[in-house]
Amino acid sequence: MEHSDNIFLVGMMGAGKTTVGRQLARRLHKRFVDCDHEIEARTGVSIPTIFEIEGEAGFRRREAATIEALAQESGLVLATGGGAVLDPASRAHLKSGGWVVYLDVPPDVLWARTRGDRNRPLLQVADPRARVRELHGLRDPLYREVADYIAESGQGSPLSIVRKLEREYLNRCAA
Ligand SMILES: Nc1ncnc2c1ncn2[C@@H]1O[C@H](COP(=O)(O)OP(=O)(O)O)[C@@H](O)[C@H]1O
Ligand SMILES: O=C(O)C1=C[C@@H](OP(=O)(O)O)[C@@H](O)[C@H](O)C1
Ligand SMILES: [Mg+2]
């Protein structure tokens, strides 16, 4: 078991980090934090607005600082943003600060789940399906690198995934 009792969810846009994380936190009586919501609360503006004003690089700096701060806490279920693992320091903070779960979902399922969504600036392109595949190819090795546990999450309801993670987490605590 890690030093703290945090659970960190990583994975692509549309993997279900926000949805699963919120329900998992409720069941385990932990505090749910979504990194994107935390950044929005700190800045007072939406993620698309941050991308518009500061570009992806500016957003990544804010994301890395937020991850660093949250990884020091305990008792959290944290839904990270899909690109949080791009920063090597963030990867190190996640690894050392909690149990890291990769919600592993095939690219075409990710694309179907995020289709038409206007709140993900990286997918506002002519061919979002190709973009999802490309990002998945680049990031999948990083998610695997940081993960303590990989939950195949392309099929089944959010609740079934929550239950699986709850069982896995409680087994780890008992071990
Ligand atoms: N296991 C699932 N099965 C079907 N749809 C899902 C599942 N998990 C999440 N979704 C849906 O996919 C979309 C993206 O989920 P979200 O939790 O925002 O993902 P993330 O935070 O990883 O980007 C939402 O509309 C959500 O309801
Ligand atoms: O994958 C990414 O680079 C991003 C994912 C988003 O979060 P979700 O993974 O919750 O969609 C959000 O942080 C931002 O739009 C960038
Ligand atoms: Mg999310």
Image (spheres, rainbow, N blue to C red):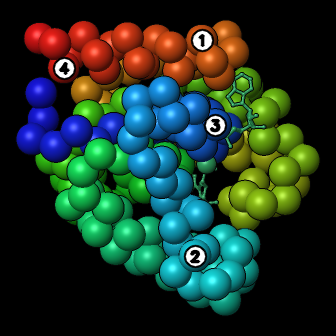
Mark 3 packing: few (<14 Cα in 10 Å), some, or many (20+)?
A: some
- Residue that numbered label 3 is attached to: 19
Ligand 1 closer than 8 Å to label 1 CB: yes
* Residue lying at 67% horizontally and 10% vertically, measured from the top left: 156
Q: Is residue 125 above or below residue 28?
A: below
Q: Which mark is residue 94?
A: none
Ligand 1 closer than 8 Å to label 3 CB: yes
- Residue that numbered label 4 is attached to: 173
* Residue lying at 41% horizontally and 35% vertically, measured from the top left: 29
- Residue that numbered label 2 is attached to: 41
* Residue lying at 68% horizontally and 82% vertically, measured from the top left: 45
Residue 10 in the image, given as x and y percentages of width and height: 44, 40
Which one is earlier in the sequence, the residue at label 2 or at label 4?
2
Mark 2 packing: few (<14 Cα in 10 Å), some, or many (20+)?
A: few
Q: Are marks 3 and 4 in contact (CB under 8 Å)?
A: no
Residue at disc 2, secondary structure: helix
Task: Specify whether 142 is left or right of 125.
Answer: left
* Amino acid on which disc 3 is placed: Thr
